Amino acid sequence: MNEGMILAAKRSHVKQIPNRSRQDVYQYFKFYIDKAIDAIREWENRVKPSNDLAHQLPINNAKNIQGNKLYDAVITSPPYINAIDYVWASKFELHWLGMVANDRDRLNLYSQEIGTERLDKKECQEIGKTGNLYLDQLIEDIYYGRYYQASKGQNKLRARVVYQYFLDMKIHFQKSFICLKQGGFYCFSRGDINKICGVNIPVAQLLTELASEIGFRQNFQFHLLLKNRKLNLPRNVNWAGIIQLDTVVFLKK
Ligand SMILES: C[S@@+](CC[C@H](N)C(=O)[O-])C[C@H]1O[C@@H](n2cnc3c(N)ncnc32)[C@H](O)[C@@H]1O
């Protein structure tokens, strides 16, 4: 199991799941499908008709975007650091959709994840340096437990997870930059602040800085207040914090 994860348990603040009939489920499903179809119709009228609009990329790792085309935009919601066990949370979907053949395939995804905790124990003893002075200071604060001393080895592991996350996101930005047309957009939506071992990490701002180092120019950004947390995992412990705002950032090549 993922060492940093607190699995969903019975929690008094979570509303009881209402009883629904099969008919209710069908009607909810239809309601949301109709909304999605309306949205797609509205969007379709806004884009120029062309035979060359959509391409499916091979299902792969965002650190290694494939395909030999240049795209108008990359629109994405990169992973949170250390907040959600995505492989666990998507377990059923991964199997139902045939995206993994067996348990081993699924468990292997952990090491490919951006934000992975499958890190070499020896490497975790070192303080990673990204070259971004502010980020490196935050990594050090986590490593030495300046704001929160976690259980044995956890501060060093968390510090390395943060370091590796930004390193991997930089690789992803580089790949995205290459596959975008000149003037193309890279848009991401990301929790504003991640609190890790008591240290507030301004992830959206740091990602914007990393992307600028690669050559992206910041176009504009806005914030969204997070009202609906789909996964609803318990995180309001004093060292982890709750992500309150999503920041949507538009970058231009
Ligand atoms: C914030 S979620 C966005 C989910 C998606 N927008 C959706 O609505 O289902 C981040 C997603 O990035 C995925 N992810 C993590 N590492 C990845 C990688 N190396 N390549 C591709 N996806 C990755 C996670 O599994 C997770 O599904």
Image (spheres, grey):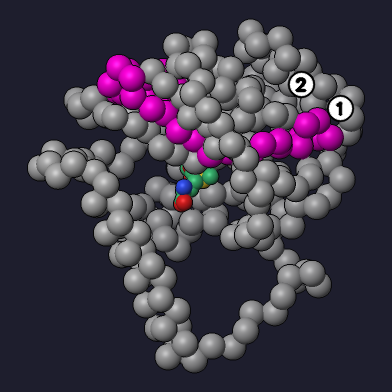
Q: Residue reaching furthest front?
A: 46
Q: Nearer the viewer, residue 171 or 50?
A: 50
Q: Quarter of the image holding residue 40?
A: bottom left
Q: Nearer the viewer, residue 21 or 9?
A: 21
Q: Which mark is residue 108?
A: none
Q: Residue at x 44, y 39 (%)?
A: 76
Q: Is residue 179 magenta?
A: yes
Assign the C terminus to one quadrant of the image. top left
* Image coords of residue 206 (percent x, y): 63, 22
Q: Residue at x 83, y 41 (%)?
A: 239
Which span of residues is magenta-colored?
Answer: 171-200
Can residue 173 be seen at all in this image of the molecule? yes
**Vertical side of 112 occupied by 140: above or below:** above
Mark 1 neighbour density, 10 Å: few (under 14) some (14–19) many (20 or more):
some
Q: Residue at x 33, y 19 (%)?
A: 183
* Image coords of residue 56 (percent x, y): 23, 43
C-alpha gap between disc 2 and disc 1: 10 Å
Q: Is mark 1 within 8 Å of ligand 1?
A: no
* Image coords of residue 125 (percent x, y): 73, 19
**Vertical side of 145 occupied by 77: above or below:** below
N-term-proximal mark, 2 vs 1: 2
Q: Does dot 2 land on a helix, a strand or a loop?
A: helix
Relative to 65, 22 lies left or right: right
Relative to 37, 195 lies left or right: right
Q: Amino acid at mark 1?
A: Gly
Say which of marks 2 and 1 sits in front. Answer: 2
Q: Is residue 21 magenta?
A: no
* Image coords of residue 139 (percent x, y): 74, 21
Q: Quarter of the image holding residue 108?
A: top left
Say which residue label 2 marks. Answer: 138
